[in-house]
Image: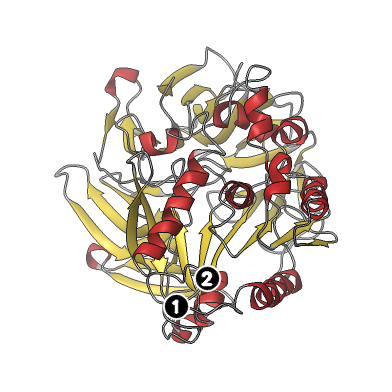
Amino acid sequence: MVTSDPPPCRSRPYGGGAFDWLPDGSALVYASVDGGLWLQPVTGAPPRRVVEHGPASAPAVSPDGSRVAYVVDTHHVAVASLDIDGGWPVLVSSGADFCLDPTWSPDGHQVVWQEWDVPAMPWDASRIAARHADGSGQVVVLAGGDDVAVSQPRFACDGTLGYLSDATGWSNVWAVRPRREDQRVLCDDAHEHGGPTWGAGARTFAWSPDGASVAFCRNEGGFGSLQVLDRASGEVVELGRGVHGGLSWAGTALVAVRSGARTPTEVVVYSGPGLGSRQALAQGPLAGLGAAGLGEPEVVSWTAEDGVEVPGRLYRPGAAVLGDPPPLIAWVHGGPTAQMEVVCNPRVAYWVDRGWAVLVPDHRGSTGHGRAFTQAMAGRWGELDTADVAAGLRAAVAWGWGDPRRLVAMGASAGGFTVLNLLAGHPDLCAAGVDLYGVADLLELDETTHRFEAHYLHSLVGPLPGAAEAYRERSPVRRAGTITAPLLILHGSDDKVVPVSQSHAVAERVRAAGGQVELHVYEGEGHGWGRPETVIDELGRTESFLRRHVLRWRAP
């Protein structure tokens, strides 16, 4: 049953944290497209506006259901709280440039949140801060600081605050009592328990209702598992494989969103003795794709020119319908602070089913391999990512993963940036390239991108004006004239992150130099596709392009 009326729900640019339930489940508070917060009863009664000002997001309802804390983004980003039945809001945070994910202490007296200051991004340096919910007293920093990234503050019933921290070099679950000196890692693990903070509402760990255990997601080189730690004994038990998220533990049931290479996204519940029974409550629209058979990828790695080991995953086609070795796509993830985890990916399935091998490189700067690997990108974007992917393609040739005459580089956003630089800097390596709304002009991006990423290039390339020459040298638009491989560019007309003008500029320079380029702009689409027909067109248009420019080659 649809219970909400306009205005519809909204979330921040990268999604998440759009609503929270009242403790008794009678209603939810959600962030709307008009910028305010609305309370929607589950009975279907008309919604009531709770917060007038905004834009407001990431609502968190107090344990007794009387107040809501939220993030407000006006002249600066802050945490505020308000009586849910009306009244004047109280500013809780103070001084930080960005705030995210407010949560309440079990007694309802404190609000806790994640915060950070520019030019750092939240995965560079961030803090867990707290203050009395009525705005009295001072803001107290409970965890994090310089050179430490923290996220996802969440209380156990006994008042212990859990959060993720990479202070050990890996983003693990930590806990802290009211005194800062009591903070400690709950599970010291050489694997990540959560990803970078690209948006609100991530839930990759959850306390048990009695606080005796904590469930957490584990990233194992892009593969995933769900684990449970017993706080008293320190014993860790694996509940299931697959990439999990959205954890919620209530009563005797642990609910999660789960996916894997063979499993479409589904909502699952773990219950019974030791939470050993798993049941799927709902599956996404691609239920049944698993039967078509997208296999698990192989874990692979290769050595970069400077001797660093670069990890990745390789999907092999089930049959050599296009030759052996097959044509190969190097699929470069976006971010670049991100990773393409092993989940059900219809795009990968599309190409593997048609006889292509797909290599997923985790170039330096990727997440999932520890803080040092992610931070290795600092000041080197446009260099290390390009070099690591080029080394991966050469390894693919050396080890027979792909046909040397039928290698393709493909990527979106930051991945498109790497693809363009790869084609310009290594003109003989790829038979073609596919750039989906990729970054092409770093100086223009620094001037036009939205507030969350306004200082991102400071860490990826360097502060301006001192690093201006690096911005120019690493901008693909400046090197587009050297691209000789056929290039397909797809972009949305309404992209607010990377303006479509950047793709137009690349196409013009490639054409002026005599290269082959096809540019298609999807009207009304933004930074990524929101309409199924656009995805269908992207796949068909790309396949036609690669048939014309790549599949005419055959291995001898």
Picture layout, residue 158 above or below residue 550? above
Judge the density around disc 2: few (<14), some (14-19), many (≥20) Cα neighbours within 10 Å: some
- Of labels 1 and 2, earlier in sequence is 1
Amino acid of disc 1: Leu
When asked about the image quadrant of residue 164, the answer is: top left
**In percent of the image, x 48 and y 52: which residue is there?**
390
Circle 1 — which element?
Answer: loop
- Mark 1 lies on residue: 294
On the rendered image, what quadrant is the N terminus found in? bottom right
Residue 511 % position (x, y):
81, 55
Query: How many numbered circles does the render carry?
Result: 2
Q: Are marks 1 and 2 in contact (CB under 8 Å)?
A: yes
**In percent of the image, x 78 and y 41: which residue is there?**
35
Circle 2 — which element?
Answer: helix
Quote the CA–CA distance across marks 1 and 2: 8 Å
- Mark 2 lies on residue: 348
Q: Nearer the viewer, residue 431 or 204?
A: 431
Amino acid of disc 2: Val
